[in-house]
Amino acid sequence: MSPANPQPTQQRPRRSYRQRSVLGSLFAFALILGCGLTLSLPLHAEPLSFPTLTTTKGVTYTDVKVSRFDAHEVRFSHAGGISTVPLAELPPDLQTLFGYDPKNEVHVLKDKQNQRAQAIITEADQKAKAAAVRQQEEADAQELQRIRSQPHRCYISRVQHTEDALLIDVLAVEKLPVMIPSRTGRSERVKLTPQGRPEYAEQAAPGKPFALGPTLRILPSSVPLTSGKIVSVYVITTDVGPEPICAISPEGALEYRKKLAAYKAAGNTPPPRTEAPPSSPQPPPGAWNP
């Protein structure tokens, strides 16, 4: 006959995940302290902590939580902040816990010194490279300003194609006032702007010598230039070849000046020029020259 009031079976409460992790960590610490092994915690374990930690120099830290350690030092947070302490200054039991070996101290310190020295050298190299880049940028800016301040206005009378550039025949250009004939056609007067000043037009001045010579070499050869037009040219160099080397923009002049300087610095000589064939047909003034 069964009892009237059966007693329910009592079940043991299940431990939470955090409790199991803490117990596992404590068991691992006990095993390490008993066997003298180096610290090796599972990833899910709680960080190694101590209520107090006193070094051999008499410094005491409270509420210590270890964040990392290596063969030379240990880093941890405590009630007063974050500190890094050499393993050699820890008590013997903690030295054993962290796997400290005095025999490796010299090698560890030497490696750290080499790493610091390499970091210093690398930082110095980076600073030197950055300073060189800034110096080059400043020099380029000054050179670009100088080139931009010295344009040469010229009238293109003929364009010739070569393998590496364009050869253009030029005439100097000056500003002349615009003349308006009178009603009778017997005299001319100067055209005035709305402000009452003479209005100028750029016109070719035939027979007047050009400062750079009658022929210029324009780089690169793909520059679209048309005969019968007025353009500004900027000198790249005048010490190579029979005619000055120019560009139609300050930036282009600076770019090719730097390329030519690097070419010469490498010990190279300027490449031979290929002149335009004498029988090349010339387009009429104002026509597009492909």
Image (cartoon, grey):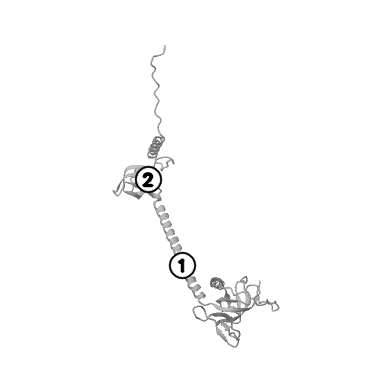
Q: Between residues 208 and 93, which one lies in front from this camera angle?
A: 208
Q: Residues within 10 Å of mark 2 (few under 14, many from 20)?
A: some
Q: Earlier in the sequence, mark 1 or mark 2?
A: 2
Spatial distance from mark 1 to mark 2, Cα to Cα?
Answer: 44 Å
Asked whether, in this view, residue 170 is left or right of residue 280, the answer is: left
Can you tell which mark lies on residue 134? 1
- Residue 78: where, in percent of width, then height? 33, 46
Q: Residues within 10 Å of mark 1 (few under 14, many from 20)?
A: few
Identify the residue position indicated by label 2 in the image.
66
Tell me the element at label 2: strand
Say which amino acid is labelled 2. Val
Say which amino acid is labelled 1. Arg
Q: Which residue lies at the image location 55% right of the left edge and 85% below the top edge?
A: 189
**For the view shown, which residue lies furthest in the front direction?**
183
- Residue 5: where, in percent of width, then height? 38, 16
- Residue 94: where, in percent of width, then height? 35, 44
**For the view shown, which residue lies furthest in the top direction?**
1
Q: Quadrant of the rendered structure where residue 275 is?
A: bottom right
- Residue 90: where, in percent of width, then height? 34, 47
Q: Which residue lies at the image location 45% right of the left edge and 62% below the top edge?
A: 126
Asked whether, in this view, residue 58 is left or right of residue 279, the answer is: left
Q: Report the quarter where the N terminus lies.
A: top left
Q: Quadrant of the rendered structure where residue 127 is?
A: bottom left
Asked whether, in this view, residue 233 is left or right of residue 135, the answer is: right
Q: Between residues 281 and 206, which one lies in front from this camera angle?
A: 206
